[in-house]
Image (cartoon, rainbow, N blue to C red):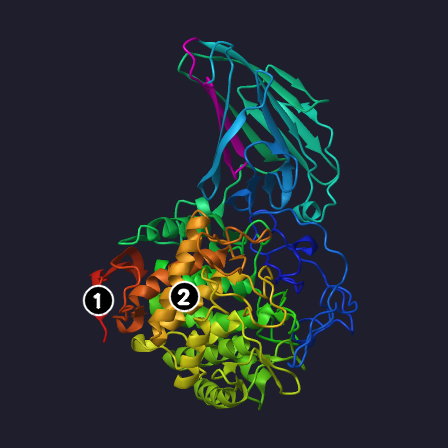
Amino acid sequence: MHQQPTPPSTVDEERPPWDRRDWFPPDGAATARQTVARPSPRNPGPNGSAGHGRPPVPDRGRRTTAAPSVRTPQGSRPAPELPPTHTALICVALPGLAISGEGQLAGRGLDGFYRGGRRLLSRCQVRVAGREPLAVQARMTGADSARFVGTLHASPSAGPDPDVLVERIRRADGTERIILRNAAARPLRLPVEVALGTDLAELGTIASGRAGPELQATVHDSGLRWATAGAAASVTADPPPSDALASAGLLRWELEVPAGGTAAVELRVRLDGAGPLRAAGQATTSPFAPARVTGDDSRVAPLLHAAVTDLQALLLRDPAHPADTHLAAGAPWRCGMAPADALAAARMTLPLGTRLAAGTLRTLARTQLPDRSPRPGVIPGPRRDAGPLLPPGCTGTEATLLFPVLLAEARRWGLPEQETTELLPAAERCLTWLRSTVGDGPYLHDPQPGGPARCETQAHAYRAALLGADLLDAYDRPGADGLRQWAQALQTAFRADFWVADRGGGRPAAALAPDGRPVPHLGSTAVHLLDTGLLGSGRLAPGLLDPVQTEQLARLLGTPAMDAGWGLRGLGAKEAGHNPFGHRTGAVRVHDTALAVAGLSAAGYEKESAGLLRGLLEAAEHFGHRLPEMFGGEQRSGGSAPLPHPAACRPAATAAASVIMMLTSLAGIRPDAPARTVTLCPVRSAPLGELGLTGLRVAGAPFAVRVSRLGLAMVEEAADGLQLGV
């Protein structure tokens, strides 16, 4: 009998990375390592339950505003210097990672090969003819591989031109191939030396600066081995070295390299007791359709390619149910299950098929709290920091509300009826939790009880109620009328209570404090008000805001205070507490920007949408088309470039999936597979010119669409019998 995966822990999902306890799942597992958080009366857990996971300390000093402060105490211990990731090349094929600088693994920072969150090798330094090659290039060749090139002079008479090229191909699966290319006119006999070492440290220990010294190696097979009380790893070489010195951690060869020819050495890093790494993303069958994009803008093709390969690299498999895959949140800091991120990313990738959505939903349904628990129906999730003016929110609330939304929309895209029916009871439990938690009131507070009513939480809850009611009606299940009645009451109350009037035309409040006063700061979480969800016949659900309020929000999102020129800031530049590098207080967040692009387009505000889209595309060029989860929110100026965030995940699931959503939103694809229709609502201004999308999937079959420079859309391939809706 298979053991069900443990529900995700309730530690902070976005606590500082050096304080993380859920870096990686066990090798190939579906969920992150679990940590039991000790309850504290002063430190409540999600939705008011005890167990936030770290002791309270006095709050740090900060500027105050007229807004009511509902910030909870935060830790004030000095933050250690986190190893930067913005200059690193991160090869990902989970549960494997290879993190590198310019080529040599020197054992500094995050350098090394990892498996399941443990560093198997931290140092791999190559010397040829007694010298280190001069590094001339380091670049990613795929989501899971990188190429490093160095040169050196081996012949005294070679002059200024190097005559030996040293190429290193490094892969996340734990292999490195070292190739020597002889450009000289005569054969060369080259002594090659590789210095190896490791501490076998966990990623969290390395990030906190607490990794120990290198371990003593022993000669093992055709290489070296290191061991501690809890783990052991080895490096084997092909061809075997002519000499192996355990005390110095050295492997040596004398290689004959013919004139104009090559010689190579391959190193294989392995964890003792584990077979070769078999990444879920390298399976013969992919949950993603082979989507392609063409058009006038040359940037879209490499951007889509990078996004899909990153998503493939971040796939994880439930070991007890190997057919079920889901996405890790990002590398290197969040390689385990983050339920809200996994659901959000699966939703944005629905144009590539419904298999990922089905696997994610099944995996999380197995973690849903049972009826006998204090919060039956909840999908557990960790805390998330919300910036200086609000307490941490519970991503379990977001995940519980996203679950029925993803199921409802996956059905519209073509999730088979049998799979939908099997998942329906879990969605019903999510909706029952929503109705029982809000009770007679209009708002869903988070965390419960006594927490603020967040703007984005109301948007998630409202969308879940409307799409959930639509789903219940489709299967003749009870409860739809009650959900719609509550959603109507929420809409009426929200338009009055959450709108903050000011001389500029007003704005939506970020939250209502427990005493009912609005928290008026403007941040990118307001974009969730534009994401209403897909109903039948290609209709979008109505929004929480009225048309006048929606127009004002669109105007605000297009101002320089919110649009940095590269994307949306997490907190407006004029707001108290703004920090261009704050991950919730001013950094550009790719997911929120993409939601704004899609939501503004659907609402008819194409100018504002196009500005954000172009900015993000230009930012992507500076990141080699591999978007991080966030980057610095400094205002764009002539000749400037977006500032990398030194702690951002790259790749990140929601950032990569955002590319799929943005590009498909330009065509406005709105399917209704049960009704055998698809409606196209393209962006009429065609901000990227002509655009062709092929290899998508609608109703279980290939789907292709082209948008002309005039903003007219045409279906070029579709399932038999699929009709174009109006």
Pointer 1: what residue?
A: 712
Q: Amino acid at mark 1?
A: Leu
Q: Secondary structure at mark 2?
A: helix
Direction from residue 257 to residue 513 in the image, left or right: right
Q: Is residue 163 visible?
A: yes
Front-most of 701 and 423? 701
Magenta extent: 161-186
The residue under label 2 is 419
Question: Which of 649/155 is in front?
Answer: 155
Q: Earlier in the sequence, mark 2 or mark 1?
A: 2
**Residue 373 % position (x, y):** 65, 74
Q: Is residue 532 magenta?
A: no
How many residues crowd around disc 2 within 10 Å: few (fewer than 14), some, or many (20 or more)?
few
Residue at image position (37%, 79%) is 474
Q: Amino acid at mark 2?
A: Glu
Q: Residue at x 72, y 51 (%)?
A: 80
Frontmost residue, 633 versus 33: 633
| Side of 183 relative to 65 (left or right) | left
* 686 over 89 or under it: above or below: below
What is the spatial separation of the Cα atoms under label 2 and label 1, in whole angstroms?
35 Å
* Residue 185 picture quarter: top left
Give how far across and how far down residue 314 sits, in percent.
50, 51
